[in-house]
Amino acid sequence: MEYKDINDYEVLYLVEENQSDYKELIFKKYAPILKRMTYSYFSKMKHFGVEYDDVYQEALIGLNYAIDNFDFNKNIKFYTYVVLCVKSKLSSYYIKCSNGKQKILNDSMTFMQMNDLDMDSLISVKFDDTYLSFYNKVLEFKNSLTRKQGQVFELKYNGFSNADICKLLDLTVKDLYYYLRLIRKKLIMEDF
């Protein structure tokens, strides 16, 4: 079967009808586009220690999101929606990898690399002072907050959504925004 002869909308309709075998057709059809977009982002990200396969995986997740959430009623082409979703996913991944929190993971060694080292070189591995000072600064800030603010800060810092934080801490949305506003105000005052 020639991929360019596949009608995206017919396949999407079949996928929507729980015939997920057809989803693979869309993945195969859009693979060249995903590879091109992945390479474009990977060339910007490789100095962060990111591997090509990780970036490609994010592109696949973006395509899967586009397939699952495409709305036939909106006046948009599927191709445009795919490109938008994949770019959004890759941009988010780029931001995530470029911030300092990921640097320790990006610079770390795999277990296979560690087997090649001798014990003397393992003993010489030390944490950089900037990582430790940043971590200490975050802990110091968290401890300066009230108990509830500290819980909200910790969950938000670890990437929980507002809905998840409300569920976990049994808060209303209004209360959560109140705590977040207080935390932001304190962050600005301390010039974090």
Image (spheres, grey):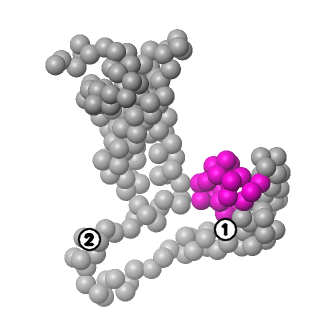
| Camera sees residue 30 | no
Q: Nearer the viewer, residue 102 or 6?
A: 6
The one nearer the camera, 26 or 97, is 26
Label annotation for residue 138: 1
- Location of residue 183 with respect to 20 vertically, above or below: below
Residue at 81 percent across and 59 percent down: it is 186
Which amino acid, by three-letter code, is at mark 1?
Answer: Val
Residue 71 image position (x, y, % from top left) = 50, 20
Residue shown at 72% from the left, 59% from the top: 169
Report the residue marked by disc 2. 113
74 or 132, which is in the foreground?
Answer: 74
Q: Quadrant of the C terminus?
A: bottom right
- The amino acid type, in three-letter code, at marker 2 is Gln
Q: Residue at x 44, y 30 (%)?
A: 68
Q: Which residues are magenta?
A: 153-171
Q: Residue at x 44, y 39 (%)?
A: 90
Which secondary structure class fits the magenta region best?
helix
Residue 57: x percent and y percent? Answer: 35, 44
